[in-house]
Amino acid sequence: MNIDHLRYFLVLSQEMHYSRAAQRLNISQSGLSHAIAALEQELGVSLFQKSGRGIALGRYGAALLPQAQQIVALADSCLRHFQMLREGVGTLRLQTIPLLIIPTVTRLCRQFKQANPGCDFEFSTGMSSQVCQSVIQGKADIGFCSKILPDPQLVYAAIQRRAMVAAVPLDHPLARQDTVTLEETLPYPHVTYSWLSGQRDPVDHLFAPVRDRWHIAYQVEDANFILELVAQGFGITVLLDTPPVHRPDVKVLPLTHPVQESDFYIVRRSAPHPMGSVERFFDFCVAESQREPAPPL
């Protein structure tokens, strides 16, 4: 069904006069007549009937009127929504791994919203694989995650680099030190990420040369769960240095040998014509990450 034909029908139902309705629509009277005739042919009914020198809504026209109003209103709302997105206003759907919420994602969103007052955000969290899938499936406009899913449908850009650290219980022998080497962690059982997490790759790469001596006692998906197990004495961990790592119930030790860093990313779909606000926010986050040092822990 042609939306323009419904718009013409609504104006004609208000004017009840072809000439006045055509002038209001800025089209020819014959063009309006053709559009109404096409709509009637598609529906298989007559919508108007003659009434003196003018016209009046017929039975079927009266039945169509409220539905046409709803359809046109919905179409107009949709157009306004996408126009707002193109202009950098409206609501952007963000999904992020929990590690990046504080303060990285919230800081970037606050700064972007200050520069674009009409913009707002919807937030959700997930593992890196879930974030990437949400972006591919159109459930999220922007994702923040590890680069766990190389895919031609996705555009990644690094926004933050973090070093590896160790976290140990407060009463652990290593807690008496100020730094630690990877070799010094090997005598103790480790809690680490499961393979469902995007953070497992950099940890696994770090331990690759000593894999046969790396004693993994527990594997879980979430950094907070890892740190809780460490705090309760289930083992120690080596992971990326992010704000959630710095808890009062664990001792965080910089890893001095080997020194390893890993990146976090912002990701969007590589659509031929991404929404203006999506592309603008993506570019804004990349520019800010290059301009400013990593936020303090």
Image (spheres, grey):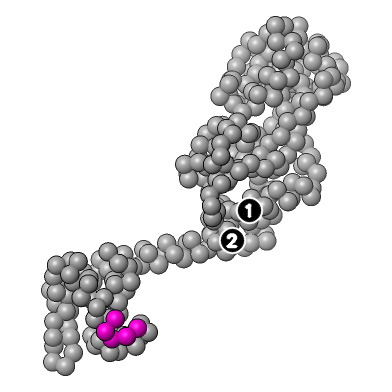
Task: Give the label on residue 88, or none.
Answer: 2
Q: Quadrant of residue 118?
A: bottom right
Residue 211 shown in magenta: no
Give the image location of residue 106, x and y in percent: 65, 46
Q: Amino acid at mark 1?
A: Phe
Give the image location of residue 237, x and y in percent: 71, 18
Q: Which residues are magenta?
A: 27-31
Does residue 117 sit above or below 266 in this rendering? below
Give the image location of residue 59, x and y in percent: 12, 74
Does residue 173 sit above or below 153 in this rendering? above
Q: Nearer the viewer, residue 171 or 93?
A: 93
Callout 2: SS:
loop
- 256 to the left or right of 166: right
- 240 to the left or right of 135: right
Task: Give the label on residue 281, or none.
Answer: 1
Q: CA distance from mark 2 to mark 1?
A: 8 Å
